Amino acid sequence: MASAVCAVTARPHLPAALALPTTARNLLFRCRAASTMDTASPSSPDAEQKTTTVFVAGSTGRTGKRVVAKLLERGFGVVAGTTDVGRARGSLPQDPNLQLVRADVTEGADKLAEAVRGVDAVVCATGFRRSFDPFAPWKVDNFGTVNLVEACRKAGVTRFVLVSSILVNGAAMGQLLNPAYIVLNLLGLTLVAKLQAEKHIRSSGINYTIVRPGGLTDQPPTGNIVMEPEDTLYSGSISRDQVAEVAVEALLCPESSYKVVEIVSQADAPSRPLKDMFAAIKQN
């Protein structure tokens, strides 16, 4: 789960320059990331990449940390938002292009705006932690995501990728009796909260991609990715590794803009480039 900046903490091995004021610090960090990405060959996808620095909300979660790793592999600079910097130091890669920021999406858009200021895009992979608080799903999956979108608008960040879930619109799909829809909504109407956040993103004017995965697994992929339009899939599972791959690829593919996609993994599905799959989905 991630959230808004109360303090900025860099890894010990990072340059002392990261202690500079926010604007100067982000400029230095973006220059370093751009320099790293300039080494890509002209024929590689990274060579045409314009997004260089990405804020990841929920960076220490099981999906979020995979997003961070994939971004670093592709040469992005990453600002990892986390509610627990110590935990992030222990679970995220040691990389000079990774910066840690204490952030909490439940603390409001103004604080979050300082966390995301200077980045080119945001990937939101937050999720509430189970607790005795019945409103936790709404605080994180609805209001927290809304806070993050509004922070982007305040800070001038124009690209947003959200990791959501299939069946968020299960009621409209006629899936009210689907066991997965029932179970996921038992915990504070989680899917309803996610759907309300999606609606806010879609009306915000920001360039978005909403990725709705099926049931998430921690195992390596056992099949190929299947991508369908919104409100199509009502069952299936997918490796978190593949979800991270789709989220990162969305930043590289103009074809993913203003789209909601649903993804699962199937052993008998053909292997297709993600760019082609994004292109086959109609814009909203």
Image (tube, grey):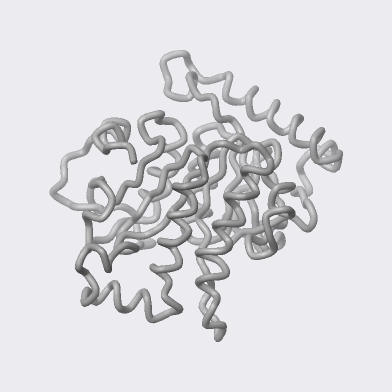
Q: Is residue 266 shown left or right of residue 69?
A: left
Instruction: Residue lying at the far top in this picture: please name it.
Output: 42
- The residue depicted at 59 percent of the width and 40 percent of the height is 54
Q: Is residue 279 shown left or right of residue 120?
A: left
- The residue depicted at 57 percent of the width and 34 percent of the height is 76
- Against 164, residue 113 (above or below) is above
Front-lying residue, 148 or 18? 148
Front-lying residue, 231 or 128? 231
Can you tell which quarter of the image residue 273 is in?
top left
What number of labels is visible? 0
Instruction: Residue lying at the far front in this picture: please name it.
Output: 203
| Horizontal and vertical percent position of residue 108 | 68, 60
Quarter of the figure that contains the C terminus:
top left
Can you tell which quarter of the image residue 117 is in?
top right
Front-lying residue, 14 or 270? 270
- The residue depicted at 43 percent of the width and 71 percent of the height is 190
Q: Is residue 26 shown left or right of residue 74?
A: right
Q: Is residue 44 shown left or right of residue 168?
A: right
Instruction: Residue lying at the far left in this picture: please name it.
Output: 268
Quarter of the figure that contains the N terminus:
bottom right
| Horizontal and vertical percent position of residue 48 | 48, 19
Instruction: Residue lying at the far bottom in this picture: please name it.
Output: 132
| Horizontal and vertical percent position of residue 185 | 37, 76
- Against 92, residue 152 (above or below) is above
| Horizontal and vertical percent position of residue 255 | 36, 30
- The residue depicted at 66 percent of the width and 63 percent of the height is 87
